[in-house]
Image (cartoon, rainbow, N blue to C red):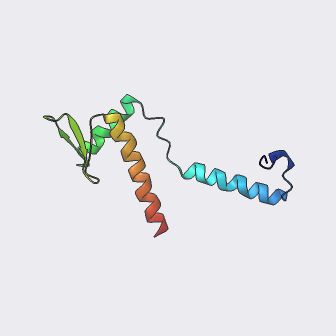
Amino acid sequence: MPGPDPHDDTSADYEQFEKEQLAQDRDAASVDTADVDDTTAQNLVNDLGYADVVTPVPEDQVLIHEPSGTAFDSSTQLAVFHRGWTAGRDADAEVE
């Protein structure tokens, strides 16, 4: 049996509106990492290096994200990870 037809939805208009608002709230709270290009990543990693959040290990050619202890061989990977990590910590702080 196929699922319900979304065009036959008979729920009240306010329920539909509430679902749309909740979806928008979730979208607004999520972190967009798709916009991290090489230049943005390099700038963020440099800033994090000055803040002692990232430690370069030249002999291993990696960058260590100090708060998590995670190693990266790409500044873009580290930048995306840090944005997600920061967003996760911020979300946890809001819950407390």
Percent coordinates x, y for residue 7 in the rendering: 84, 45
Percent coordinates x, y for residue 8 in the rendering: 86, 49
Residue drawn at point x = 35 percent, y = 37 percent = 77
Percent coordinates x, y for residue 66 in the rendering: 24, 51
Along the line of sight, the residue nearer the viewer: 24 or 44:
24
The image quadrant where one finds the C terminus is bottom left
| Residue at the limit of the structure toward the bottom, as seen here | 96
Along the line of sight, the residue nearer the viewer: 76 or 40:
76
Instruction: Name the side, left or right, on which 35 lies relative to 72.
Output: right
Instruction: Name the side, left or right, on which 42 lies relative to 89.
Output: left
Percent coordinates x, y for residue 60 in the rendering: 16, 36
| Residue at the limit of the structure toward the top, as seen here | 38
Instruction: Name the side, left or right, on which 19 lies relative to 39.
Output: right
Residue drawn at point x = 49 percent, y = 47 percent = 31
* Placement of 58 over or under 29, stated as above or below: above
Along the line of sight, the residue nearer the viewer: 92 or 73:
73
Residue drawn at point x = 40 percent, y = 46 percent = 83
Total numbered labels: 0
| Residue at the limit of the structure toward the front, as seen here | 1
